[in-house]
Image (cartoon, rainbow, N blue to C red):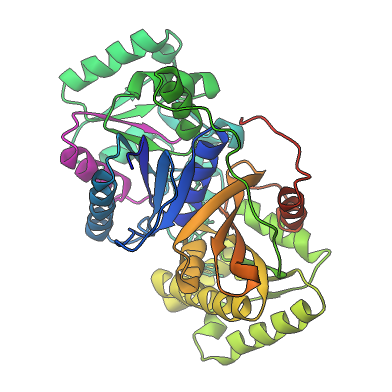
Amino acid sequence: MALLLGAIADDFTGATDLANNLVRAGMRCVQVLGVPDSSIELPDVDAVVVALKSRSIPADEAVAQSLEALEWLQAQGTRQIFFKYCSTFDSTEEGNIGPVSDALLEHLSGRQTVMVPAFPINGRTVYQGHLFVGDRLLNESGMEHHPLTPMTDADLVRFLARQTPHPVGLTSRTVLSQGVDATSRHLGSLAEQGVRHVICDTLDENDLDVLADAVVDYPLVTGGSGLGLALPDQYRRRGWLQPVAEPGRLDKATGSALVLSGSCSRATLAQVARFLEHYPGIALDPLALSKGDEHLAQALAFAREQLASGGPVLIYASADPERVKAAQDALGVARAGELVEHAMGQLASCLVDEGVGRLVVAGGETSGAVVTALGVRQLRIGGQIDPGVPWTQSPMPGCDGQLSLALKSGNFGGEDFFSRAFGVLDELTTGRAGHESAR
Ligand SMILES: Nc1ncnc2c1ncn2[C@@H]1O[C@H](COP(=O)(O)OP(=O)(O)O)[C@@H](O)[C@H]1O
Ligand SMILES: O=C(O)[C@@H](O)C(=O)COP(=O)(O)O
């Protein structure tokens, strides 16, 4: 098997987001969780997204895991590598976007890569190197309160420069608006000056098309999932990718419905509040979790009772910035996060064992913890609930052999996401979904 595109994603929701866009743009794509071992059997696909949980770990470990993924993808004969990180550039001054990009570029003997975090349909745009979420600069978007990677600088050229010893350049909207040739020339002249990383402005899908055309031959591209919507068209134009009749079909979904939420983003907090207006839920508190098993046992008992009477039910650690800070002050940032993630993993394992077959998880790290605890190795991508969030399925003992999973990025989804998700799954798996355009 030769792959047109091999992606290395730094978290699990981000991986699903990219896989979703590749499928919507007409690629046959599968997502694998962690670097596969030799026993994995892959279907015939054009792209594979390897999901890592490397966004918030020490930079040297993130580099090692990413290089392992690269080696595996190269062994599959992959034509182009895509390093997928968050559309809100989630990272710290230590990394991991800079160190991982540097290592991948070096191993691919590339002289330059582009950094394209934008995802315009979800309101992430870049202008003069500054990242916007909707009409706010990144550092005023709520991301400044992120529990693990608080984003306090919207100037990506300046911010990335702290993560890499190499110079960071900018391809501005003014250049992009002059078209593909001007953009290629500009990137080329930056490369001649030794600029290995180029932050790219992006206001809309047209900018993504120009960028995709200009970098289709780069060994490495990096960014959010927006670029993943634009690249397949360039592959098709060059005759490398054949049209696919029907990507993304899912089997009938069975089993009860559960939502686990560990994201503390503004979007998720609103989704939690909306869900609780109509359905039952129980909060997890990291401080109570740190005191022993009783808190987790209570949440499990509550969920069992609600699931027995039909569900859906929500278990959430999502909390506002003051409560997150209080937990972090008492326990430390890493420990507070670990307690919640561990609890979410245990809840998922028990409840899927007992009959949950439709599971929504909110939060990238949280999703990583949950699918790892469940032992999920491969996801088939189905139709989307909201931009960036598809339903997926994975083989699983119980639930008629298939677990339906939606891994929601903290920041994505409409306010009614949690309740609507199950209706969308029903439509998708009974074939009642209407055809939507890819963008
Ligand atoms: N109440 C809380 N206090 C402290 N940390 C929390 C709390 N709830 C969740 N967390 C942690 O915050 C992190 C949220 O990250 P993540 O799941 O990636 O969400 P997002 O997708 O919004 O970034 C996780 O590590 C989670 O365990
Ligand atoms: O690009 C994005 O915004 C998402 O795909 C993403 O990376 C999700 O990360 P979380 O917000 O941590 O779920």
Q: Is residue 7 visible?
A: yes
Up/down of 259 relative to 355, above or below? above
**Is residue 226 found left or right of 415 in the rendered image?**
left
Up/down of 67 relative to 162, above or below? below
Q: Is residue 118 visible?
A: no
Q: Which residues are magenta?
A: 91-118
**Is residue 380 found left or right of 281 in the rendered image?**
left
**Number of numbered labels in the structure image:** 0
Which quadrant holds residue 213?
top left
Image location of residue 192, percent across then percent down: 16, 18
- Assign the N terminus to one quadrant of the image: top left
Q: Which is more toward the observer, 65 or 295?
A: 65
Q: Residue at x 33, y 63 (%)?
A: 39
Q: Is residue 295 magenta?
A: no
Up/down of 310 relative to 115, above or below? below
Image location of residue 2, percent across then percent down: 32, 39
Image location of residue 176, percent across then percent down: 42, 15
Q: Residue at x 30, y 62 (%)?
A: 37
